[in-house]
Image (tube, grey):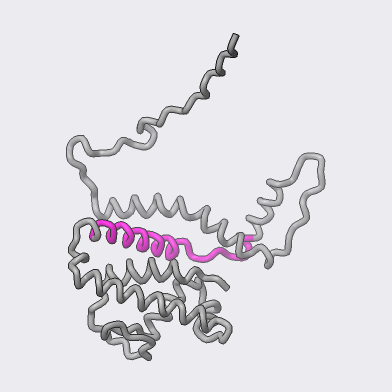
Amino acid sequence: MNIRMAHMAGMAGLAVLLALGCGKVSKDTSQVLASVGGEKITLNQFTTLVRAAAGDDAKTKEVLTGEAMREQRNRFLESLAQDKAVIALAKSQGLDQDPKVKAQLEQVTARVFMQSLIEKRAGEPSDAELKAMLEKLMKSQAEPGKPAPQMPPFEAVKPQLVNLWRQDKMQTLVDTLLKEAQQKSPVTYAEGYKPLPVSQAPQAPVPQPAPPAEKAK
């Protein structure tokens, strides 16, 4: 099972650890899985990041306890440890105070928070919703005058249906969350810097095909 652990180490490790601070005193007394320059990665911290990568409790348990997942689990822990080492090195050279780095970290942190807000609001689809989506998809593929395509087994396509359901929800939730965020924290712009509404924004010109070359006489 591939749960994109390297990607999660980069996003969760760098964005979350930096945003929340990796030097704070913690009351976490769970087993220490690794120590990086005196900074600990505990079982509780590791479990939280694995759960974020795996997506559900069953997969999380498989990753954390399955013998077949030992090497992938260890590689993920190694990635987290490397992230902490890089963070410590960068901070020792004052990069955490560099305006360019701080701006980039703020952007990454905002994306992580947005993704978390979307997942929290979206919830999980019911089987009834997914089956209705499957039926709609099958009908859309039917050709006039021909038998409808055979319905695939629901359980076989359920993961793909869940992904489609989330994609459908995502754009609506992004718009809703952006409006909510701006209501909570009103945005004002300096004169000349307020962007136009999308409907009024100038569109890039459509490229026109080059005229055919004249044949040599």
The residue that appears at 75% across and 57% down in the rendered structure is 151
The residue that appears at 40% across and 80% down in the rendered structure is 46
Is 90 in front, or is 171?
90
Q: Main secondary structure of the magenta part?
A: helix
Determine which quarter of the picture holds residue 125: bottom right
Determine which quarter of the picture holds residue 129: bottom right
Q: Is residue 54 left or right of residue 45?
A: right
Image position, residue 19 (x, y; %): 27, 68
The residue that appears at 71% across and 48% down in the rendered structure is 139
Q: Which quadrant: the C terminus?
A: top right
Q: Please say whether residue 126 is one of the residues in the magenta stretch.
A: yes
Q: Is residue 70 left or right of residue 19?
A: right
Is 85 in front, or is 187?
85
Is 144 in front, or is 16?
16
Q: Is residue 104 left or right of residue 124?
A: left
The residue that appears at 48% across and 80% down in the rendered structure is 73
User: What residue span does the magenta drawing correspond to?
Assistant: 102-130
The vertical placement of 216 against 31, above or below, is: above
Q: Please say whether residue 105 is one of the residues in the magenta stretch.
A: yes
Determine which quarter of the picture holds residue 2: bottom right
Image position, residue 98 (x, y; %): 19, 60
Q: Residue furthest top?
A: 217
Image position, residue 170 (x, y; %): 47, 55
Image position, residue 128 (x, y; %): 63, 62
Q: Which quadrant: the N terminus?
A: bottom right
Q: Is residue 193 left or right of residue 65?
A: left
How many marks can you see? Answer: 0
